[in-house]
Amino acid sequence: MADSITITCVKHIETYVDSSSSKSPSQQDASLDALAKLLMNDMITLELLVREMEMYLTTTDNITRARGILLLAELLTRISSKTLENNTIHSLIGFFADRLSDWRALRGALVGCLALMRRISGTGAISGSDANAVAQSFMQNIQVQSLGQHDRKLCFEILECLIDSYPDTVLPMEDEFVYVICEAIDDEKDPQCLLITFHLVEILAKLYPESSSSLASYAEDLFNILGSYFPIHFTHPKCDDDVKREELSRALMLAFASTPLFEPFSIPLLLEKLSSSLPSAKIESLKYLSYCMDKYRGNTIQEQHEALWSSLKDAILTSAPSSLTLDPGYQDNKVVDEALILLQKLIQQDNDSFSFLKLILKDVDINMTLKNLSNYNSYDDITVTDKQRLNAVGQILYVSAAASNASCNAIFQSFFSELVNGLRSMMQEKDPARPKFGYLYICVDLLTACRTLVKPTEVTYDDNETWCTMLHSFCTLLTSTFVKTMKESTHNIYTHSGVRGLQILASFPGNFFPVSKSTFEDILVEFISIIIIKFNNASIWRSVLNALVEIASLIEKSDDFEKMASFDVVVVERMLALLSSDDFSMPFSLKVEAVSTIGMTNLKYMLKIVQELDTAISASLQKYWLDGNSNSAEYAMLLLECYGYKVLPWFQNTKDTDNVPMHFALKIWDEIEDNTLFCDSLNEKKLLETTMNGMKHAVASSSKLIPLMVDGLAILSEDVQNRDIVYNLLLVLSGIMTDKNGQEVIVENVYMVIMCLNKLVFYQHMMLVRETAIQCLTAMSDLPYARVYRFRPEVLQALSRALDDPKRSVRQEAVRCQQAWASISSRSL
Amino acid sequence: MCSVSRTTASGDKREGDIKDPEHPYSLEELKVITEDAVEVDDKRNYVRVTFTPTVEHCSMATVIGLCLRVKLMRSLPSRFKVDIKVAPGTHATEDAVNKQLNDKERVAAALENPNLVDMVDECLTPSYE
């Protein structure tokens, strides 16, 4: 029955199979799509199609046969969701499996096999024996490395599919199969293919149990193939945009770690590459080692501990920077970072035997460095190499101690008392300008480490640990050493060490017994005395202020009530007293900065401070108006700026604080009201500007202020004498409109604002007021349409009268405003 | 007199920026409208504008007139009566155009047409900048 559909089919088939240049690739693709569509819509059956194609599938003309088989294969790929009968699938897969021997038509055979193998059982899939047939034919007929890139990729995908979807077929093949894979992937160079081959090794290794003899016997060969690619390095940069180096590196890493059988080979290789001089090779090795540690569970690791420690130590010692920072755990150097991560992992994994940790504790270099600490007199005496060494040792001890309570105990037991003795001798020395820096440095590192072990969320602490007991016994000595260093040293690095040490001691949770409440309060007292007395040294002043802020934030986060109370009494109250005192030795700006910075850590503190600030502002303003003292004006400006730029924005991020901005604004208005002499001096202008800025922020934070402002404007505009105030208030309003937060506030009160402005458009006493009011109205036309459209008629009415204003600038503004409001609707005038 | 020149100056500057719908030049640049052709009487609330299309068969004459009217409507207080006429002898269908431009109902109807309104707005946009 040669109906029209069949004829169409045949035409499409012929188009696709035609290998002469008369048919373009896009035409052929179109035919393929058309055929696929016919199949999917059940206009023709697959059986019919195959029958029509018989000639092309079996012809002796190689090229035509290749095209024919490829056509069928591509069609099968496209109809993967169509349900097919098992017989059909069985005969098709048999055909394609057989065609794997036909090297001229290999592409089609590979595509066909893959298409059928990827089918899911819901719509008809191949059986286990079919898969077996494919595997056998593959192993017999295909030499993967002799094929082109695209075909090799298909081969690897078939192997991948076999392992993923038909593992039962592959398992019994053992030796044969593993051998075939080795042969197939050996010497592969294409990045896309390599991605698949690495994945192949990974899933192959996971497929066979460790006890499998075939995998064990091939493990070395397989690993040698993999190992030759490490570390990943593209010979032609940017030769393949699709596959990135990181992707390949990660795939290789997964393959390395896929079975413990690789362990005896991978670790030596990685350690070898770790000693290379190329930083990127070092980093890669460290990353791989880290990852493999997690996956291997064997005992070979133990045997490798010495080699591992030696390589890691070398890597850290040679790559550590020579600048000593007081913040362990942050290094700018990737090699050191990765090495330290691995180090910590090794210690943590080692919790039973501690063999790795023992290597560190007994290490000659570390012990020597610690003994030599007594040789470094002042910081400047330390040579660059020694600084590097000190840094490296500090880092190593830090991560080792921070790894676990057990390791911390061991480190403290080995080293801590010696360090403390060093500090003790420091304290007894008459000459404070030459303290032993090394002891300080390592001490701070160890303290930081043990601090990380105390998690703030735990309610009870494991206070039975050895290190806790040791810390407890040395706490007082540590505190006094740090205090002495902080107060008496002239070199910044010493004072900062002291501050840092004290800060860490103060940041332990309140119920942590080694650091008592009195120690905590003593530390706070020392800090506050620096703030109040040592303000001339900017660097230490700032670092102490920062330390206080950190402590306060920690207390706030952990809700430690006891500590909060201590902090309140010792620090906050003192600072408030500072603000109101008449002691002019400390610059006012520093006082304000200190008070406001501490306030920002906690709402309770801030509320107290705000009260004090309010009082201070009123006092300064009144003083200024009374006797024109420029100092008072300056104080007032500092306070207002602090309020406007720091305090009020801080409140905006906190809830339940509408009242603060409102009280502030009302207070300011009260002051202004009482003193309406605005003369022209420069000081005045600046003061006014600062006041207005503060008001702007206040109003933006508290929407209750707008009604007050509007009422104020209404009342004030009745008396011609108030015209300057009216103008200034209007300027504040226009300022609010330009601010994003302010706009929200305006929108909430749009009715009364517009009504107010509409009236001010006719304010007879001052042209600027009329002009500004119209400009404000123009700005308001940009607000959300839904909120403002209903006022459009009233506004336009007011403006049409304003067009007749005696002053030209007002008329011009009115035209602009009218245009703005007219065009918010689709209808024009 | 001083009041006349004031309004003239402001009204003219604005008209000078009205775009011709077909060309990228303004009406003033094309000499379609000049300062002399604008008469203002502030006391009697009366403005008359006479414009000269570039060619006799100008098909855009009504649109130009409409633009002028809209611009004046938006810029003058409502007390003014506005008269817009084609300069005598400069257009083939002078009477018809004049009738159209000064008929309140026809103007209102024109402004209901969204396409026309868009065109007018586009022509007038430069004059507001």
Image (cartoon, rainbow, N blue to C red):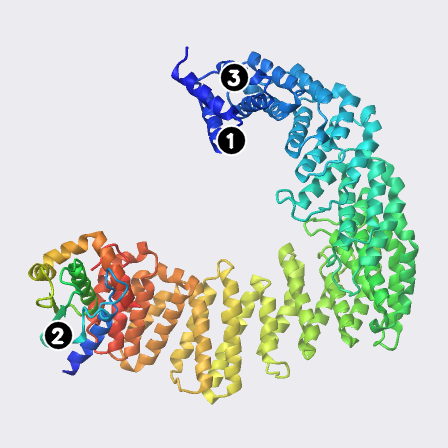
The reply to the same-chain question for discs 3 and 2 is no
Q: SS at mark 1?
A: loop
Which chain is indicated by disc 2?
Answer: B
Left or right side of A758 for A32: right
Residue occupying the point 77% across, 30% down: A182
Label 3 marks a residue whose chain is A
Q: Which residue is label 3 attached to?
A: A53
| Residue type marked 1 | Ser
Outermost residue on the bottom side: it is A627
Identified by mark 3, the residue type is Met
Q: From what the image shows, is residue A589 above or below residue A511?
A: below
- Quick check: A288 above or below A816? above
Cα distance between the residues tagged 3 and 2: 90 Å
Subunit of label 1: A
* Residue visible at 78% across and 71% down in the picture: A494
Q: Do the residues under discs 1 and 3 have CB atoms within 8 angstroms? A: no
At 71% from the left edge and 57% from the top edge, which residue is drawn?
A510
Expressed as whole percent of the image width and height from the top left, the position of residue A436 reads: 86, 70
Q: Which mark, by number, is residue A21?
A: 1
Element carrying mark 3: helix
